[in-house]
Image: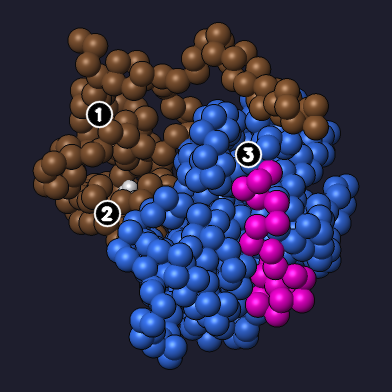
Chain colours: A blue, B brown
């Protein structure tokens, strides 16, 4: 690569620049090396404000190498877990991926329940799935909004936020929090859904597919969108798997891997939905995956509502002692969070607090494939690539 | 090719924008008008009063202080058994994360959520609520420019 550019530069010099021209007989050092230019992108840049720094090595405007610098949002969540009881740690999981907090709670409580062998009432399971899927829709909506905004489609941002607002209202109705829901408890959920919730939720499910058409009108076959996304930031399935890419990002490379299907937890095996897989390997394919996932999640929500309406009443919380002490042991539980595989690894020494808690955050692993995706592309495409893997720095730095 | 020349793809998008251009705005002009939160909303926390208004329900058991993940509650009580009442009850709202655990664990329903949420303050001291301030009517602090 460097060789090619060098000869190009000499050509340009021969043709002449505003500063002069390489004349016949000029001494030109053939050993002159064209060096990469290292520049900082961030921490202040358009797609992740103040929390992600990229160091780019450039040849002209092409990226030859990239280094990801993280740690701007480090809060020591894993260490904090060792000083909190199992119950007290739930609000902290909310703050990992703050855009889909029910999904984060879900992973944690499942891990603790697996460790302690707690049976969860079936009604609570359905409520949990319902919430997690709403969170997936809201997370993908925010992703679509900001991703499109980064690439230059402003209108989509406003439309997506309109629908996201509806979901946040639903969260507020059921849990009391809009962004940070803290709704899941070890052994169930905090309290049953209010009676008007299911109707409002059904309303949303009716409206939502129509609203997706709105976004499609602006993006799906829009020429500007296509030229910014098709064939940009490609990553093959093998490379992606080797780098630990998961979730919608790897499904955009044609790998049919969704923990809800491949390793079902909770009641997902009783629900009917399709796993979205596209094999374009590029930004556009990842857009298609998430777009379809929103619609599929909407279907799951509908099924949950149907079940919950058919089976009203009943327990939503299993009996868990006030001073909760799980047995000695270790456990790993992974769930399909909106960003990918979210895992909690807990080591218990039989006391009230975890001995060690490790979080396998999807965005952290996904971020590692960013340099691979961006190599050979233009600087302007980095923003599209970051958007396409949907990083949330809250869970990267933890 | 013809499609490209006629910019069909762009015009579909513009048509949608044009349609919404004439619909009613869904935004709320915040300080002038305000949305009412839903009943379960987790705003600032208050001490609840007994039905006969003879004091607070709290029996100073200290459960909330123990359960609080950010350790921002301080309780000291006096008296024995049923007669126990708090003399010191501080909640530091600059550290509270509104998780709702304190409200949930309280055995007598001594705490409740209000719909007051405008806690952005210049003065940190203002957010340190003591027992007297926790029984006030939070409505008076709500901000709106419409007088
Ligand atoms: S809401 Fe949570 S953080 Fe706030 S005082 Fe209650 S227990 Fe503590
Ligand atoms: S848990 Fe309830 S009764 Fe006990 S100290 Fe807290 S507010 Fe008072």
Q: Nearer the viewer, mark 3 or mark 2?
A: 3
User: Between disc 2 and disc 1, whose residue precedes?
Assistant: 2
Which picture quadrant has residue A105? Answer: bottom right
Q: Are marks 3 and 2 in contact (CB under 8 Å)?
A: no
Label 2: which secondary element:
loop
Residue A85, percent across and down? 45, 70
Q: Is residue B30 something that shows in the picture?
A: yes
For disc 3, the chain is A
- Which marked residue is nearer to the observer: mark 2 or mark 1? 2
Q: What residue did someone put label 3 on?
A: A224
Give the CA separation, mark 3 to mark 2: 46 Å
User: Magenta segment, which residues?
Assistant: A226-248
Q: Residue furthest bottom?
A: A31
Indicate the position of residue A53 as horizontal and vertical percent values.
Answer: 39, 66
Left or right of B76? Residue B67 is: right
- Per the image, label 3 sits on a secondary structure element best described as helix
Q: Nearer the viewer, residue A277 or A348?
A: A277
Q: Quick check: is A227 in the magenta stretch? A: yes
Residue A285's x, y, as percent? 74, 53
Q: What label does residue B138 carry, if any?
A: 1
Which label belongs to residue B95? 2
Task: Estimate the spatial distance between the alpha carbons at disc 3 and disc 1, rounded to whole Å.
Answer: 51 Å
- Image disc number at residue A135: none
């Amino acid at each position: 690569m460097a060789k090619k550019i060098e000869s190009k530069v000499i050509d340009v010099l021969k043709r002449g620049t505003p500063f002069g021209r390489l004349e016949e007989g000029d001494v030109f050092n053939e050993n002159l090396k064209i060096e990469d230019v290292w520049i900082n992108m961030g921490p202040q840049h358009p797609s992740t404000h103040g929390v992600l720094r990229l160091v780019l090595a450039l040849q002209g405007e092409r990226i030859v190498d990239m280094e990801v610098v993280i740690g701007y949002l480090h809060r020591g969540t894993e260490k904090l877990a060792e000083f909190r009881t199992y119950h007290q740690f739930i609000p902290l999981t909310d703050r990992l991926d703050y855009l889909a907090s029910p999904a984060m709670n879900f992973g944690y409580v499942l891990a603790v329940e697996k460790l302690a062998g707690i049976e969860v009432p079936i009604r609570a399971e359905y409520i949990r799935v319902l919430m997690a899927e709403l969170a997936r829709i809201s997370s993908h909506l925010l992703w679509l909004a900001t991703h499109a905004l980064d690439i230059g489609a402003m209108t989509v941002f406003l439309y997506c936020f309109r629908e996201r607002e509806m979901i946040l209202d639903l969260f507020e109705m059921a849990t009391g929090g809009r962004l940070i829901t803290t709704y899941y408890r070890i052994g169930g959920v905090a309290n049953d859904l209010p009676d008007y919730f299911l109707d409002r939720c059904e309303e949303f499910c009716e409206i939502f597919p129509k609203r997706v058409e709105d976004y499609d009108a602006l993006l799906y076959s829009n020429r500007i969108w296509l030229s910014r996304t098709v064939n940009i930031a490609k990553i093959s399935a093998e490379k992606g798997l080797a780098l630990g890419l998961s979730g919608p990002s790897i499904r955009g490379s044609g790998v049919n891997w969704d923990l809800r299907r491949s390793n079902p937890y909770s009641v997902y095996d009783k629900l009917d939905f399709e796993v979205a897989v596209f094999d374009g390997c590029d930004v556009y394919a990842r857009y298609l995956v998430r777009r379809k996932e929103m619609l599929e999640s909407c279907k799951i929500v509908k099924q949950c509502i149907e079940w919950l309406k058919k089976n009203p009443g009943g327990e939503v919380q299993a009996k868990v002692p006030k001073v909760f002490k799980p047995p000695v042991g270790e456990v790993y539980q992974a769930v399909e969070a909106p960003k990918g595989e979210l895992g909690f690894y807990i080591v218990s020494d039989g006391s009230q607090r975890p001995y060690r808690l490790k979080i396998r955050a999807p965005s952290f692993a996904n971020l590692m494939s960013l340099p691979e995706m961006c190599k050979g592309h233009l600087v302007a495409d980095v923003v599209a690539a970051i958007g396409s893997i949907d990083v949330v720095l809250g869970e990267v730095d933890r | 090719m013809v499609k490209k020349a006629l910019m069909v793809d762009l015009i579909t998008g513009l048509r949608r924008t044009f349609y919404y251009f004439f619909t009613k705005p869904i935004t709320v002009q915040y300080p002038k008008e305000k949305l009412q939160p839903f009943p379960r909303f987790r705003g600032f926390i208050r001490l609840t009063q007994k039905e006969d208004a003879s004091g607070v329900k709290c029996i100073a058991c200290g459960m909330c202080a123990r359960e609080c993940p950010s350790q921002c509650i301080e309780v000291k009580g006096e008296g024995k058994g049923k007669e126990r009442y708090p003399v010191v009850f501080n909640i530091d709202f600059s550290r509270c994360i509104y998780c709702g655990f304190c409200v949930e664990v309280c055995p007598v329903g001594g705490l409740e959520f209000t719909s007051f949420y405008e806690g952005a303050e210049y003065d940190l001291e203002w957010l340190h609520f003591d027992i007297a301030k926790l029984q006030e009517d939070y409505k008076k602090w709500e901000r709106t420019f419409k007088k």
